[in-house]
Image (tube, rainbow, N blue to C red):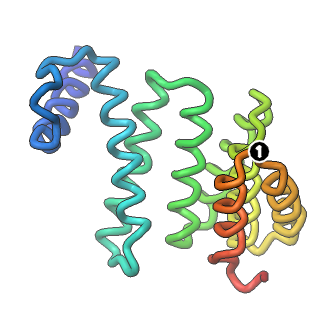
Amino acid sequence: MKKILLISFLLLCSFTLFAEEIEEDQPKEFTLEQAYQIFAVDFFNRTWDFLDMPERNYEEDEVMLNLAHASLMHWSIIGQPLNMQRGEWMVAHVYTIIGRKEPALHHAQNCLNITEKFGFEDFDLAFAYEQFARALALNDDDDWKEYYDLAKGAGELIEEKEDREYFLQILDEGPWFGKR
């Protein structure tokens, strides 16, 4: 009972914080599953807002990390494997960007495990390899180059030209922690 009350309280607090962004024509009442999805997507997108900042301070890094974890937590309740894979990628990416070695590698491995288990290909396979390579580079593991090459190879096979070009651009950008 306490768990349900805590979840309800957290959802109510989160909903109240973001209520002004809900359009007038949307229903004001949501099922629990709809609320989880709203929060998962919103927190994921808000993580990108922080990642796009040219500079962040410690507190902003912590908010960014909490948003990524919150998104993943909500997807873990109602998401499909692809949502979990992308959520693990985001958490790993944030940890990598802020230089936290062990959790970056842990979540990058989770992302890669999900990718392999469900046979994800194309864009998602390339990004799973890319993030694992970055986490390995952050951890000074020489295997980073193997996964970088796998990422590049998978990226070159991405079907959609715009997605392929975007991925290859991201792959060339840092951080590579002095490895490239």
Rendered position, 100 above or below 69: below
Residue 21 image offset from top left, x and y in percent: 16, 42
Question: Between residues 169 and 144, which one lies in front from this camera angle?
Answer: 169
Q: Which residue is mark 1?
A: 159
Rendered position, 84 above or below 96: above
Residue at figure coordinates x 36%, y 28% from the top left: 37
**Amino acid type, mark 1:** Glu
Tell me the crowding category of disc 1: few under 14, some 14 to 19, or many 20 or more residues within 10 angstroms, Cα based.
Answer: few
Q: Is residue 76 left or right of residue 103?
A: left
Placement of the C terminus among the 4 image quadrants: bottom right
Residue at figure coordinates x 77%, y 48% from the top left: 158
For residue 124, which quarter of the picture? top right
Residue at figure coordinates x 81%, y 70% from the top left: 141
What is the tally of numbered marks visible in this picture? 1
Q: Secondary structure at mark 1?
A: loop
Question: Between residues 162 and 126, which one lies in front from this camera angle?
Answer: 162
